[in-house]
Image (cartoon, rainbow, N blue to C red):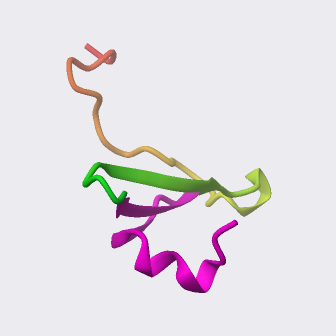
Amino acid sequence: MVKPKRLGHLVKIVGIGDHRVSLGVYLFDPEGNEIEVFYELRREQWPDGQIFAGRFPGSLED
């Protein structure tokens, strides 16, 4: 088992994202593959109102 304090020696963490309904950690594994590890927040912790304010590519709204 890898201890959390040692994780930085095994992978390169390149970013952390707050997606309002989840938290993501972006990293490269030892072989150079970029991956995201995320934690979805409990629904009670989600913000009120519109969560997604953009438009989908090839929008379903048209």
Residue at 32%, 18% in the rendered image: 61
Residue 10 on image: x %, y %:
43, 71
For residue 61, above or below residue 5? above
For residue 61, above or below residue 48? above
Count numbered badges in the picture: 0
Residue 38 on image: x %, y %:
55, 55
**Horizontal arrangement in the rendering, residue 21 relative to residue 28 (left or right):** right
User: Would residue 51 be counted in the magenta stretch?
Assistant: no
Asked if residue 21 shows in the view, the reply is: no
Q: Is residue 7 or residue 50 the one in the foreground?
A: 7
Residue 13 on image: x %, y %:
36, 72
Q: Quadrant of residue 58?
A: top left
Residue farthest to the left, as pictured = 58
Residue at 37%, 57% in the rendered image: 29
Asked if residue 12 shows in the view, the reply is: yes
User: Would residue 23 be counted in the magenta stretch?
Assistant: yes
Q: Quadrant of the N terminus?
A: bottom right
Residue 7 on image: x %, y %:
51, 75
Q: Quadrant of the C terminus?
A: top left
Residue farthest to the bottom, as pictured = 5
**Horizontal arrangement in the rendering, residue 31 relative to residue 7 (left or right):** left
Q: Quadrant of residue 17?
A: bottom left
Residue at 33%, 15% in the rendered image: 60
Residue at 37%, 46% in the rendered image: 53
| Magenta extent | 1-28
Q: Is residue 23 or residue 46 the one in the foreground?
A: 23
